[in-house]
Image (cartoon, rainbow, N blue to C red):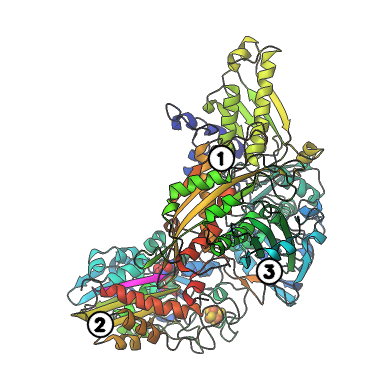
Amino acid sequence: MADATTTPAKTLATIPAGLPATAPALPPGMGQPVPRYDARAKVTGSAVYAADVALPDVAYAYLVTSAIAKGRIRSFDLREARALPGVLDILTHDTIGDAIRPVKFFTEGGPASNSVVPLGSPEIAYAGQTIAVVLADSYEVARDAAHRVVVDYAVEPPSATFGSPGAVDQELATQNKRHDDPKVGDFAAAYAAAPVTVDAAYATPAQHHNPIELFATQCSWNGAQLTVHEPSQNVYGIRAGLAAQLGIAPSQIRVLSPFVGGAFGSKGGLTQRTAIVAVAARKLGRPVKLVPTREQGFTVATFRAETKHRVRLGATRDGKLQALSHDGFEVTSRPDPYAVAGTDASTRMYACPNIASNVAIVRADRSTPGFMRAPAETPYFFALESAMDELAVALAMDPVELRRVNDTAREPIKGLPYTSRNLMPCFDRAAEAFGWSKRDARPGSMRDGDWLVGWGCATSAYPTQMAAAAARVSLFPDGTARVETAGHEIGNGLYTVLAQTAAERLGLPVGQVSVLLGDTDLPPAPVAGGSISTASVCSVVAQACDAIRARLAEGGAPPTDVVAALKERGMGSVQEYAEWAPHGAPKGALGLLYQGKAQPTGGAKLQDRIQFAFGAQFVEVRVHALTREIRVPRIVGAFASGRIMNTRTARSQYMGGMIWGIGSALHEETEIDPRAARYVNANLADYLVPVNADVVDVEVIMVPEEDTLVNPLGIKGIGEIGIVGTSAAIANAVYHATGQRLRDLPLRIDTLVTGA
Amino acid sequence: MRPFLYDRAASADGAPAALALPKDAARIQGRLPAEYLAGGTTLLDLMKLDVMQPGRLVDITPLERREGAIAVSDRGLRLGALAKMSAAADHPEIVRSYPVLAQSLTLAASAQLRNMATLGGNVLQRTRCNYFRDTAWTACNKRSPGSGCAAQGGVNRQHAVLGTSADCIATYPGDFAQALMALDASVEIAGATGPRTIPFASLHRPPGSTPDRETTLAPGDLITALLVPAAPWTRRSLYLKIRDRQSYEFALASAAVALDLQDGVVRQARIALGGVATTPWRARDAEASLVGRPVTPETAAEAGRIAFAGAQPRQHNAYKVALGRNTVARALLQAATLEG
Ligand SMILES: Cc1cc2nc3c(=O)[nH]c(=O)nc-3n(C[C@H](O)[C@H](O)[C@H](O)COP(=O)(O)OP(=O)(O)OC[C@H]3O[C@@H](n4cnc5c(N)ncnc54)[C@H](O)[C@@H]3O)c2cc1C
Ligand code: SF4
């Protein structure tokens, strides 16, 4: 196989061919729909993913995972497994020694997404924990041998989830110093006095990302130098964490991840597998390849934990919120206090003088949860936006008008101004496209033959965050330019929007710009999470391009034709390295960036202002009158997220978010056996996601928005907002169709058909 | 997956090879656990999960030319066991005159699987009970007889409410078998002692105390064809499959129905249920309740109630009783509107 890092550059020539002859005129703030830089490579199969890299003389690893969730390993019987021809070694806690050092969980300043030390002890912390790794000459032999490993466990009864015996409840604020429950005014008094109230409990299930690309890792050593091929949303973070685990310098490690076949948060953290494969490769003295199975992926990587909510709203008869309280409860693991604490956003959406909130975590014998698309907002807005719909019903008020009555230019907790907020323009544009004015508000009133039709809507919002980033841009006399930064292409279109940014800033055709990403030999970029990539990395690339123009200006006016200027000055090439940090970034943000620890800032975390993207989603559902299955023929979403770099890739992001919202509302649930704290449906036949037939008409409206405060380019993140309001909009539509209010996700036949 | 011996059944271009059985068919089961390999979409899947560990596979796909034909006559259909699901699903005469068969296949699995999987393998597909498919669970009477049943007391949303036993509540997952049940099909078998034909309804065994024994086939028995008799009700037939998502999911509840109507009154009704029972399930009492009456929302609902009279729900699958009843009613009402 070709050197993975050079592949994108080779596909470059395809861009101009895909461009329309004359660029279409677009509304202000909308970037050209340049086709994806990596589209051809991906659809023709020439994009090289981590597991595709062919390393010479590679050995294969297969994981043995724990059948029990709590207890310890008394002993292994490895005789039958070792006896298979082709088996090279079997690593267990007995044989690996202390090769892998403990590192801290990320909320405690460490790099780990799960602080259990890989193969660190005989203790079992969760079902599916890696307890041994078989190394063999072929994948088939490794798998066969893994099935022959016999484990003698001392089993203890585990706690599976909320309410399980032995699960421990804690206030989040006592476990995470950075968490502070938002509150203002006197909620209790205002709620007691409010003429109209809603008090409702909601629940969301455990969910797993299941990206199509599995959680592969390949490691090879060349002397003291380690190369890691792993799909990653954070190559500098993986490098730093792995270096700490192995006790070597980060400069001894190179992490490569030029393409990622879906991530959604699951490839952002340092998981146990990387160090295990690195140690295995060092021990064998040859490269090692691990591709965990789909089922193993459910515990090799992280997941979205189940949550519970209690939302109380109190309003005047004309719909003005007087009191709002949101209590969240989240499951996490015994060792790590992971929580998403969506109250940060859910308490700040609407004007309201009296607000209370609380987040509690429940420790169970599970693997540590982690980020999954709009980690905080997806579950917390399901609760908030369902409750808002319940309030609209209680008030006999149109749900869009309820949002309008409570719209605000300042967040209610500290009174900070929004840098921009176009929630109601989103509602109005989407409502018009959807035909909302034709809605008959009475539940069950819009029947079509055997199908009950329901229309519902909800607010979407996502914090506008950014982090420090670095990049190098080079301009060559042949009229080409190269952008280099260790950002991540996870389907977000980063190759494409960076080429566009550089082309625009340098005045070059976009096809003349090549982009290199996903490699720790390049200047660092932050984690591709929190929808921060485009805003952060485009900002630094623009800055480097401006520096090139300034250099060529030689003190005068910047040249319009940079290539001509370059030749005129007789220069071989110009190269500029830039560093950029967003408003509100901590001191030393760039140092942290180089250590793989750049933290996103923004959203509701700033002292002087609040910055969010907003959207509104409208959904039509159909519920069969007899058999009660729910179908979603139509979704319209309108979003205002600052400047849109590329309307083609942006549309895909919004649409993908909404489609996932259908899955999150109706299909996805990781089932947990209550006795064994073990996942039951860890495969793609039983863990349901929407298929094509479930996705009929999805319309995306991009509402123009100018916000020059968030960053000089005016970019807000768009990767996650699309999923945020969908599940509430669907639940609200199901209520409208049936008169049944479903407060637990996924919304299922089970409840509708029994009327429970 | 463990290593196995691989044989190909007498190839299609070879001699007629008496019934095309492998020479040592009779010895297959006794010595080495052995399995026929057709499309492999059930078998290889379970081997990779280490649930099935046959020491030997006999690949029967070389028999496709002989045993994969679909023949239509006045008397009915002969569906070769090695015909692909897609071939039967798309066969114009089946689509026209036996819609319940075509629909049960079209609504099953995915296009890729239907192009791979055979009709014989389809009717023998094994349960999707997740406690059966994950060997980390030690208690599964179907996988290791006498070990218990982890699904009872576990997550059993997808499990059966009809035909269960104290030892197993696993659902028969397929769709096509319900259509065969409804149309009184039979199974042509090439056994070690020669060919025989049995009613399709007697192919699957209820779990009872031996859920590991799923069929009445003897060791080495090869299904060669499925025979569907022509009847007055085959045209007015349909398959209704209810699931969480629109496609590519096993049934939560399904109904294969066929009606013979005269002047709007039922002469004969056929109802078979899927997704709710441990075996392909014929609802004979419900059928009888309709005879001599028109199909109305009331008679259809009553048939649904009768079909689930003996249901035994567990913790998470009680909804299947209500869903199953309504599925039967909806299927009957819909079938009654079809041309006979
Ligand atoms: C993801 C997924 C989704 C699916 N969804 C559905 C669905 O919605 N509905 C549905 O009905 N099915 C569904 N299936 C099941 C699928 O239809 C079956 O796996 C398939 O029909 C089996 O046929 P095969 O030829 O591949 O059988 P194989 O896997 O080759 O064989 C299955 C078993 O039958 C035996 N066998 C095969 N042929 C014969 C014969 N002629 N005589 C004797 N024994 C024989 C084999 O020894 C083996 O034990 C799904 C499967 C998958 C993997
Ligand atoms: S229901 Fe049957 S297949 Fe499932 S665990 Fe119980 S015995 Fe095994």
Residue drawn where x is 48% and y is 69% of the image = A739
Q: Are marks 2 and 3 on the same chain?
A: no
Image: magenta residue range: B232-246
Secondary element at tag 1: loop
Q: x and y percent of residue A569 in the render?
A: 65, 10
Asked whether residue B8 appears in the rendered view, the answer is no
Residue at 63% x, 43% y: name it. A257
Residue contact at pointers 1 and 3, CB within 8 angstroms = no
Give the label, 1 or 2, closer to the camera. Answer: 2
Ligand 1 image-quadrant field? bottom left
Between A621 and A256, the one nearer to me in the picture: A621
Disc 3 is attached to a residue of which chain? A
Q: Secondary structure at mark 3?
A: loop
Q: Is disc 1 in the same subunit as disc 2?
A: no
Name the residue that disc number 3 marks.
A127
**Magenta stretch, overall SS:** loop
**As drawn, B328 above or below A388:** below
Q: Residue B294 has which mark?
A: 2
Residue A493, label in figure: 1
Work out whether residue A535 or residue A197 is closer to the camera in this orientation and state it: A197
Was residue A128 drawn as part of the magenta stretch in this picture? no
Callout 1 amino acid: Gly
- Horizontally, residue A210 falls left or right of residue A539, namely left
In this rendering, the label closer to the viewer, 1 or 3: 1
Estimate the spatial distance between the alpha carbons at disc 1 and disc 2, rounded to whole Å.
60 Å
Q: Amino acid under label 2?
A: Pro
